[in-house]
Image (cartoon, grey):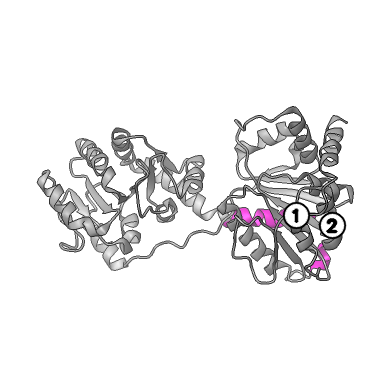
Amino acid sequence: MLEGLALRLRLALARPRRPGPAARAAVDVPRPEGPLIWLQIGAEGAADTAQGAVLLLRRLRRLCPALTLVVAAPPAVSGQWPEGVIALDPPEDCPHSAALVLSHFRPGLIVLLGNDLPAALIALATEAGLKVMLADARLSPHEPGRGLLARTVQRALLQRLVRVLVRDQESVVPLARLGAHATRIEVGGVMGEPPDPLRCSEAERASIAALTRTRPVWLAAAVPAAELPAVLTAHAHVQRHAHRMLLILAPDTPDDASELAAKLAEEGWTVARRSLEGEPDTETEIFLADDPAEYGLWYRIAPVTYMGGTLSGAAGHARSPMEAAALGSAIVHGHQTAPFAPDYARLDEARAARSVYDDRSLGEAVADLMAPDRAALLAHNAWAVTSGGAAAAETVVQAILAQLEAPAQLETA
């Protein structure tokens, strides 16, 4: 009762607003005949939400060619939408805009991606007997609190959803506490297409692997000059545990490799360069990987990779951690994770990466991960993250198809 009153009050406050420009522009688009799904991405939709939406739409187009797909995404959230998908701006969150869009498109199902709950769209759709589901939602157990009215409206909206698919198990309890029916919540995972593994010459890989077979190896990728002291300190620490440890050092700016090699030699390190010596020998302590086109080789060689720039945030050519994850290298990183913060968050949540704070913790992490079972566990979890996105998207697709009124009319292929 209280939730219904709060929602009606919320809608009444927005009712005087006339249909906005987004809603008016939407209804200028002709509605094709046949069944239609309205898929809407929230204003705070992350980049990976858009990627997941693209995967969903492709799969739905392939399974149900007779199904019209409309995606409403804010301008800040862009995607390479499949051919035939109608792309629009989301309508304004007021009753007149929502009513105009619903009466024009007459969707058989509304799918919301992300955490946003457009009150007018959900309320008017469910009052008209239309199903609304939420997917790709993620809530922290420590989600910041809202005012009483906002929480009550949120509860009313969540109770109207026929199904809720969340990214992770940690989101289940907060959503149920906020009002979603526990029996309608399901963990779907994070949607996304697996990255294409970086390539390398198999002959080169086999040759270097043979040279390093009896030596522990770690890789420091895209290391900026500001982090060189931390990486060297960490390497010295690791060598106290494994004196034959080899560091493959890929500088952030390969053009600096000549000066860097001279600097390292002056400090007493035994150094070799990929561009000169080609391969490390048994005495090499630091091997400079000064060709950025060969990361596919080094991720395969090194069981542990520190992602450069994440201690200082200074990397000019930061690498995605998914590159290393896809090739079985355990990932170590600092807290400066831009521009790949969502990827690092996924890896950390899946216990697929090790977070460090400084040179000491970096050295300790690398030394610890020299134990094959520990590195293998991280690498396995990371591989599951990179390969599980397609399965998560398929879970959402099947949930969508199950909610449609008349699947037989979709001419599934």
Range of the magenta residues? Answer: 390-410
Under tag 1, what secondary structure? loop
To which residue does mark 1 refer?
A: 91
Check if mark 1's residue and mark 2's residue have beta carbons within 8 Å. yes
Does 4 sit left or right of 210 as displayed? right
Instruction: Using the image as rendered, state which of residue 304 and residue 34 is in the foreground.
Output: 34
In the picture as drawn, the residue positioned furthest to the top comes out as: 148
Tag 2: residue type?
Answer: Leu
Location of the N terminus by quadrant is top right
Number of disc labels: 2
Residue at the image position 34 percent from the left and 43 percent from the top: 372
Instruction: Using the image as rendered, state which of residue 58 and residue 70 is in the foreground.
Output: 70
Estimate the x, y position of residue 203 in percent, counting from the top left.
28, 68
Residue 367 visible at all: yes
Tag 1: residue type?
Answer: Pro
Residue at the image position 15 percent from the left and 51 percent from the top: 284
Estimate the x, y position of residue 35 in percent, counting from the top left.
82, 65
Task: Give the quarter of the image for residue 267.
Answer: top left
Residue 91 in magenta stretch: no
Residue at the image position 25 percent from the left and 46 percent from the top: 216
Q: Main secondary structure of the magenta part?
A: helix
Estimate the x, y position of residue 297 in percent, counting from the top left.
32, 60
Q: Which mark is residue 314?
A: none
Estimate the x, y position of residue 238 in percent, counting from the top left.
24, 38
Q: Residues within 10 Å of mark 2 (few under 14, many from 20)?
A: some
Q: Which mark is residue 100?
A: 2
Location of the C terminus by quadrant is bottom right
The mark that comes first in sequence, 1 or 2, is 1
Residue at the image position 88 percent from the left and 47 percent from the top: 127
Residue 218 visible at all: no
